[in-house]
Amino acid sequence: MEIIAEIGQNHNGDMGLARRLIAAAKAAGAAVAKFQVYDARVLFPKEGNEWFDYNCSTELSRADVEMLALECARVGIEFMASAFDVERVQWLERIGVRRYKIASRSVTDRSLIDACAATGRRLIVSLGMWRGASFPAISAPGGVDFLYCVSKYPTPLVDLKLGKVDFAQYAGFSDHTVGVEAAMAALARGARIIEKHFTLDKAMYGPDHACSATPHELASLCRFRDTLTEAL
């Protein structure tokens, strides 16, 4: 069972904070520290988006990405990123990432998916915004792990319907709820991968901090994973 600490934008554009988040994710027991790599002015709408300036301030440069990957290697945790365009797939390929994450908002972006698949590496695909009756037809030589996801931020527990999710088909769960209880429930029901947003402080400025796990919560989730693995 694998816990991905989704740092995402929660570094707030501060690479010192990003390094502290990597260290805290490792200390808590996560297997992966994950970021998001994008061209903010292309990916995020400006009109009607109260977070547009924030989105732009959290855009990682190629040098930032290379530094963060080196920091993850130094700490001993896997570096992963959601790439949102083909150019940034090339950045990640030069770093030598093990896997690629396809975010829910990119699940219909065939050029991006094809570029990730063409690397031959494994893909992890969140399906929060997928509206098809069955899983999307994604062929990747390295294989594909689909994550169950509800694209509400935060997601009310009542909207999860985890009891109806078949974790023999879904590899895991991308969790946007407050707290870690939903992630624990998914693990208990057979999820092999949990992706959970991660922050040092829920009160920090930014759209994702409030529904992110703190170091204490992430450590609790990782202890639950270890106990469940032993029990099973």
Image (cartoon, helix red, strand yellow):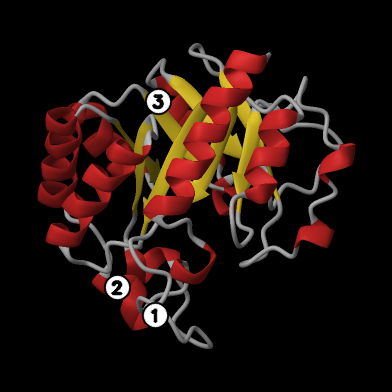
- The quarter of the picture where residue 52 lies is bottom left
Residue 25 sits above or below residue 159 on the image: above
Q: Residue at x 77, y 20 (%)?
A: 168
Measured as percent of width and height from the top left, residue 73 is found at: 17, 28
The CA distance from mark 1 to mark 3 is 28 Å
Crowdedness near tag 3: few (<14), some (14–19) or many (≥20) residues, C-alpha within 10 Å: many
Q: Earlier in the sequence, mark 3 or mark 2?
A: 2
Amino acid marked by disc 3: Arg
**Residue 177 placement, left or right of 39:** right
Does 162 appear above or below 94?
A: below
Q: Position of residue 1 (x, y in %)?
A: 55, 23
Tell me which amino acid carries mark 2.
Cys
- Toward the viewer: 26 or 144? 26
> Which three-letter amino acid code belongs to the residue tagged 1?
Phe
Marks 1 & 3, CB-CB < 8 Å contact? no
Q: Which residue is mark 1?
A: 52
* Residue labelled with disc 2: 56
- For label 1, the crowd category at 10 Å Cα-Cα, with few meaning under 14, some 14 to 19 and many 20 or more, is some
What element does badge 2 sit on? helix
Whichever of labels 1 and 3 marks the residue nearer the N terminus, that label is: 1
Q: SS of the residue at dot 3?
A: strand
- CB contact under 8 Å: marks 2 and 1: yes
Q: Decide if residue 111 is in sight here.
A: no
Residue at mark 3: 99
